Amino acid sequence: MRSSLNRINLLLVWLVCLLSPAITHAHESRPAYLEVTEIQQAIYDITWRRPARGDRVLAMQPVFPENCAVKGNVADYFSSGAHVSRWTLACQENGLVDQTIAIDGLAQTITDVLVRIQLLDGTTRTQILKPNATSFVVHGNPDSWQVIADYFVLGVEHILGGIDHLLFVLCLLLIVKGNWLLVKTITAFTIAHSITLAMATLGFVKVPQAPIEAMIALSILFLAVELVKQQQGESDIAIRAPWIVAFIFGLLHGFGFAGALAEVGLPQGDIPLALLMFNVGVEAGQLLFIATMIMIIQLWKRTTSLEPAWLPRVTVYAIGSTASFWVIERTMSF
């Protein structure tokens, strides 16, 4: 058992080192956000938000069709780690439908852009733009299959891009012993964050995002402390009944997922379907991560005999230090 644990912890040290650039520069990898709201026929309010660190902002700009022009002044300001620009866009009679919107400079970054378009008839369209897909055509009312595809992909990308959520799941994998207990723990986490995701997205509960993000980081720190206790031979609730801890903290993580979904919005005609597919995408990404970790661990156990005695403690302190940094950073952003 100790041999397997040491191999796993060696793998985790490698993973933490691999992820450290993303961890310490998390803001640069956050998606940008473009919101286009039609307020009159062919007249749009534009909100363009780019991640920022201090006064450094990603060099990207939206490019609208030639039949559109800026109307009035552009308002620029910094807000919560982002640079925000707002303006009014006036287009010719047909507006943006069947026209192309692109993001200039996106191809030179490692981030994504979430685009949300709300037309005058209430139709809402979302799109994810990437460095290898920097433009799209604005269609009218999307069909159900488009909603399914868009929100499923959005859910998968959100969980796989959320280093804090993945690190929490990684801690659960390290704490839990036994396949059945692992199934119970992951199921409890899934049920919990599905509940709060639905409640927050549908407007039954409203919580400020900044404290939630800090508490998510605190949940990882809590599990790191529990891992130390486990290594010292102590038994606490996270070790005896990890599914209870996973459920309680899963409620917090669900509010975090809801915050990301709120930035994108839901299509008014397909809210239940979009919410369901986002949640299914989150679960698919989570299961993909777990399966990948288990496969890597098994491969590692079969191909290496390195078992340094210091690895378990170093692994836990690496996780705990990362979580502590997030707690401080996110608390200071209140």
Image: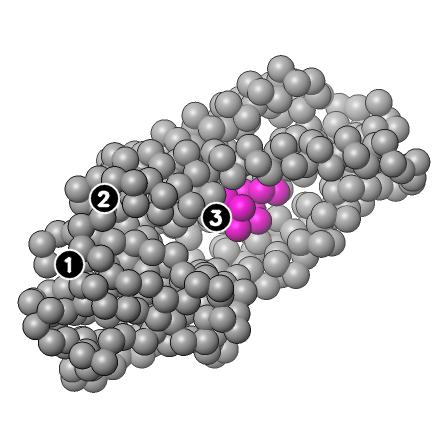
In this rendering, position of residue 158 left or right of residue 124: right
Residue 196 drawn at (x, y percent): 36, 34
Q: Secondary structure at mark 3?
A: helix
Residue 268 drawn at (x, y percent): 18, 45
| Badge 1 or badge 3: first in the primary sequence | 1
Residue tagged by mark 3? 157
Amino acid on which disc 2 is placed: Asp
Residue tagged by mark 2? 143
| Badge 2 or badge 1: first in the primary sequence | 1
Query: Which region is colored magenta?
Result: 159-167
| Badge 2 or badge 3: first in the primary sequence | 2
Amino acid on which disc 1 is placed: Leu
Instruction: Identify which residue, 258 or 293, lies in the foreground.
Output: 293
Is residue 216 something one can see in this rendering? no
**Which residue: 75% across, 27% down?**
230
* Category of crowding for the residue at label 1, using alpha-carbon neighbours closer than 10 angstroms: few (below 14), some (14–19), many (at least 20): many
Query: Is most of the magenta stretch helix, strand or loop?
Result: helix
Residue tagged by mark 1? 119
Give the quarter of the image for residue 118: bottom left
Instruction: Identify which residue, 205 or 183, lies in the foreground.
Output: 183
